[in-house]
């Protein structure tokens, strides 16, 4: 099972319990007690599994997770103290609701940080196979994880592997501390021997058959948990290295392809630029020649136009002179004609006057 899916499922389970608590009435003491018992169990198991497997494995294999793991351990520590206080507190206590409310706020904040910042980093780095291996180990660890909070117990390996597993067995079987203690000591001895590369010490549990059996169970479960952590960490490291190697190869391939493509593009652009420059030079020469011809053409056209204009002026001028001469002649002719007409008219008038006088004289004589 995918490790992150497993943890997210746990988060949804506790969130449903939180909502159930928030909906319960002020005096629903039985309901609130039952819900808090379930919250204690779920969070104790969840925190133990994260601390035994998820945190140490990811801290060892995912870069830049050191700070978030340390912060998460501190948040778990506070949560476990609050859970341990709630275990013995009556729901009728005036501080009960307030304590649960603070617990819920803390866990919601913790879940948000894990899901939004921490888990995506882990998923990117480890990949599906490593997360499945880690998830299987965590699912197995959940079956023997403590169901009650142990805030004074170690929360990092190797201490939490031995003590956490021992506490889990005690929580579940409710048997003698003697057997658990013996099993815990034996498991710790096994772990030390393993780290030092020595043979496991031979230990014979003492006491009742239940105590001896409990000691053996604790020792075996601790060994299983230790193996699970080591296997999961090894797998995750292998997977992370594989992922890094693949990513490096892929990056090199991409770089080579990009370089080739860039070189081709540069060459093609250079060829294009040379062609464009040549075309521009040819085009410019053509334009200059054409412009020169145009200027020459325009110039001769202008000259021709100027000549035509001179001619027109001259023609106009001589036309005007001719018109003037002709007008003067016409005027003279008109004057002469007028004079003649005046003379003729005078003459006719004088003749008429003499004729009138003669007629008058004749008339008076008669
Ligand atoms: Fe957590």
Image (spheres, rainbow, N blue to C red):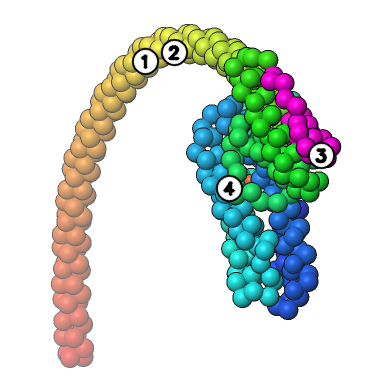
Residue at 67%, 63% (x, y): give it.
Answer: 88
> Does residue 208 belong to the magenta stretch?
yes
Residue beneath disc 4:
152
- Whole-percent x, y for residue 131 in the image: 71, 30
- Whole-percent x, y for residue 237 in the image: 63, 21
Position of 33 relative to 241 (above/below): below
User: Distance between the Cα atoms at labels 4 and 1?
Assistant: 90 Å
Whichever of labels 3 and 2 marks the residue nearer the N terminus, that label is 3
Of discs 2 and 1, which sits in the foreground?
Answer: 2
Mark 4 Cα-neighbour bin, 10 Å: few <14, some 14–19, many ≥20:
few
Residue beneath disc 2:
273
Position of 121 relative to 151 (above/below): above
- Whole-percent x, y for residue 212 in the image: 79, 35
User: Distance between the Cα atoms at labels 3 and 4?
Assistant: 28 Å
Position of 158 relative to 12 (above/below): above
Residue beneath disc 1:
284
Residue at 65%, 26% (x, y): give it.
Answer: 189
User: Distance between the Cα atoms at labels 3 and 2?
Assistant: 95 Å
**What range is drawn magenta here?**
200-221
Of discs 4 and 1, which sits in the foreground?
Answer: 4
For the view shown, which residue lies furthest in the front direction? 207
Mark 3 Cα-neighbour bin, 10 Å: few <14, some 14–19, many ≥20:
few
Whichever of labels 2 and 4 marks the residue nearer the N terminus, that label is 4
Of discs 3 and 4, which sits in the foreground?
Answer: 3
Q: Which mark is residue 208?
A: 3
Of discs 1 and 3, which sits in the foreground?
Answer: 3
């Amino acid at each position: 099972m995918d490790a992150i899916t497993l943890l997210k499922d746990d988060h949804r389970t506790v969130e449903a319990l939180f909502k159930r608590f928030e909906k319960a009435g002020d005096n629903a003491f039985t309901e609130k007690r039952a819900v808090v018992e379930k919250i204690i169990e779920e969070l104790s198991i969840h925190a133990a599994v994260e601390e035994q497997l998820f945190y140490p494995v990811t801290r060892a294999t995912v870069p830049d997770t050191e700070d978030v793991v340390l912060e998460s351990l501190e948040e778990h520590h506070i949560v476990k103290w609050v859970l341990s206080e709630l275990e013995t507190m009556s729901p009728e206590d005036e501080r009960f609701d307030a304590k649960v409310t603070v617990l819920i706020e803390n866990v919601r904040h913790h879940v948000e940080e894990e899901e939004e910042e921490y888990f995506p980093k882990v998923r990117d780095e480890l990949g599906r196979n490593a997360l499945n291996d880690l998830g299987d180990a965590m699912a197995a660890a959940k079956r023997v994880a403590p169901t009650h909070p142990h805030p004074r117990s170690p929360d990092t390996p190797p201490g939490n592997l031995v003590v956490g597993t021992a506490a889990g067995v005690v929580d579940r079987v409710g048997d003698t501390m003697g057997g658990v203690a013996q099993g815990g000591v034996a498991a710790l001895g096994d772990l030390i021997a393993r780290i030092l590369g020595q043979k496991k010490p031979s230990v014979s549990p003492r006491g009742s058959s239940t105590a001896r059996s409990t000691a053996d169970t604790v020792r075996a479960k601790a060994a299983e948990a230790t193996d699970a952590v080591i296997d999961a960490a090894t797998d995750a490291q292998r997977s992370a290295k594989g992922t890094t190697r693949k990513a490096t190869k892929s990056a090199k391939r991409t770089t080579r392809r990009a370089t080739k493509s860039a070189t081709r593009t540069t060459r093609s652009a250079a060829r294009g630029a040379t062609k464009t420059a040549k075309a521009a030079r040819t085009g410019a020469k053509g334009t200059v020649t054409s412009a020169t011809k145009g200027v020459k053409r325009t110039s001769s056209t202008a000259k021709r136009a100027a000549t035509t204009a001179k001619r027109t002026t001259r023609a106009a001028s001589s036309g005007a002179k001719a018109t003037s001469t002709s007008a003067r002649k016409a005027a003279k002719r008109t004057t002469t004609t007028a004079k003649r007409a005046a003379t003729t008219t005078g003459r006719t008038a004088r003749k008429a006057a003499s004729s009138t006088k003669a007629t008058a004289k004749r008339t008076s004589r008669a």
